[in-house]
Image: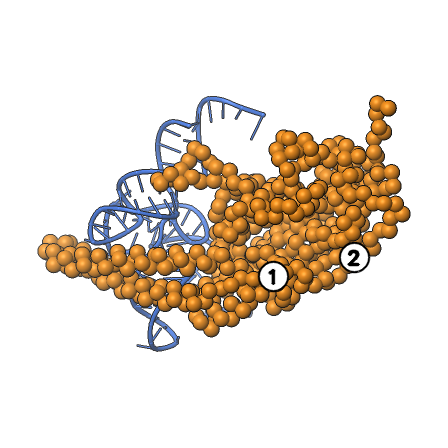
Amino acid sequence: MIDPKYLRDEKDLNEIKVRLAQRNYDLDTGLLLSLEEKRKSFQSRTQELQSQRNAFSKQIGQAKRNGEDASAAMAEVAKVGEELDEVKKQQDEVLAEISKIAYTIPNLPDASVPVGKDDSFNVEQRRWGEPRKFDFEVKDHVALGEAIGGLDFDSARKVTGSRFVFMKGDIARLHRALGQFMLDLHTQQQGYTEICVPYLVNSDSLYGTGQLPKFELDLFHTLLTATGDEEGVQRRYSLIPTAEVPLTNLVRGELLQEKDLPIKITALTPCFRSEAGSAGRDTRGLIRMHQFDKVEMVQIVHPEKSWEALESLTANAEEVLQKLGLPYRVVALSTGDMGFSSAKTYDLEVWVPAQNTYREISSCSNCTDFQARRMGARVKLAGGKNVLVHTLNGSGVAVGRCLVAVMENYQNADGSITIPEVLRPYMGGQEKIEVPAKSGK
RNA sequence: GGUGAGGUGGCUGAGUGGCUGAAAGCGCAUGACUCGAAAUCAUGUUUAGAGCUUGCUCUAACGUGGGUUCAAAUCCCACCCUCACCGCCA
């Protein structure tokens, strides 16, 4: 949530309307202003009436204790109570309407973010590595994986549905090696603490990091069939779309001490995304799946330190690709291409030879106080003041897509795949994944 | 899954209908003392909103939501969660 103070006054509203328009969000300032006016008048009246009621109640209490007759005051207060119920009801409606809007407003883009309506306005920051020149025709990871017998999309379609996969043998092991390597890098060399998190979360957590209420349809939900509240409304748990959700929500509702910061945590988890809107894109291969593994890094930092933290977080993710020898570039997302909670995002795009292009493999964001405000995550500063923390998250990196990059960039003419050196310790020293000899002929 | 107990501020913990936004202790902050520190003493120490004479006044919040009442931390209902014991289980 952005600071609700910005939603109160016309000057602020017009200012953030411009900045939100850069993110393709149309802020209805007229509606907010009229709601705000109503809120104020209802609230003043409510408080006035409550104050009257409290005064009467005090009188009544006093009278009763002295054994006097209180019926006159009780008759007065009945009238106050009636109006109070009425005004309170209207006030609650207005408040609900305002907060409904407030929860769907994205974070304000930082001034340094390139302005533009879509990804064509993203600005490349730097490149690392040189895409390899192949002296044979490159195969994509699907062809490589099927020849090796390591990627089985057909069985996944049978067992579950489209956009799932079975990995087998050396490919499954390579996939596992990648995740282990990334986790070890973050924990042993970059100062992150490894966390093993729940893969199902409640809706408060999803509100906290910003997936709800707007992105309901991008998530998989499970129903808790045995429970329901008075109106029969069922609770549910949802599968995490990223470990950012459980990791960041660790500090939800917490008051941290300044000495606890920064908190740097990481987790390797499966991620589940329904992405109902993106059917038809990247239908072939591992690029866009309903389930994929990802190593996620999260930092909870002092509000004045988040911008330097974004740079170091991004560098932490880059190091994964550097150690793997995978060419990539870093792109600053434009205002129109950023995620809901982010004030600034760098994407890491890895070279994918078969597509002859760079594809997103990591996204590193500074969410400033946007998630912290939703979560109620604060820190007590020296001097005793409580302020919202800043939260950051970044993939370090998407394991499935990284597997694609390794397979395609390290492929050989015969369809075998050379295992990058840093992964060999995780594969019992194995150097190559071979195409099995055709049997039965 | 069964039975019982319970959820109060940064923490521990009192409070069973009104004078309790909340005792007491701890912690923390500021000041005094000190060369400095410890100890000691004094003062202060939740958040959000409204108003104005900017320091004060008012309102709300005691797991969450609803209800009873002139008045709810306190009574009632539902839900969530925690602890203990039993059962079941990888």
Q: Nearer the viewer, residue A142 or A173?
A: A142
Mark 2 vs mark 1, CA separation in Å: 25 Å
Q: Chain of mark 1?
A: A
Colour mapping used in the image: by chain
Judging from the image, mark 2 belongs to the subunit labelled: A
Q: Secondary structure at mark 1?
A: loop
* Closer to us: A279 or A273: A279
Where does the image place residue A418, in percent across and percent down from the top left? 84, 41
Q: Nearer the viewer, mark 2 or mark 1?
A: 1
* Amino acid at circle 2: Trp
Is A392 located above or below residue A275 in the figure? below
Return the residue found at the far front. Answer: A280
Image location (x, y in percent) of residue A191: 68, 51
Q: Is residue A430 visible?
A: no
Dividing the picture into quadrants, the one containing residue B70 is bottom left
The chain drawn in blue is: B
Left or right of residue A274, residue A227 in this image = left
Identify which residue is drawn at 84% across, 28% down: A438
The picture's colour for chain A is orange
Image vertical order of residue A20 relative to residue B11, above or below: below
Q: Position of residue A187 (x, y in %)?
A: 68, 47
Q: Are marks 2 and 1 in contact (CB under 8 Å)?
A: no
A322 left or right, relative to B70: right
Q: Which residue is mark 2?
A: A128
State the residue in front, A53 or A222: A222
Which residue bears the numbered disc 1? A336
The quadrant the C terminus of chain A occupies is: top right
User: Quarter of the image holding residue A427?
Assistant: top right
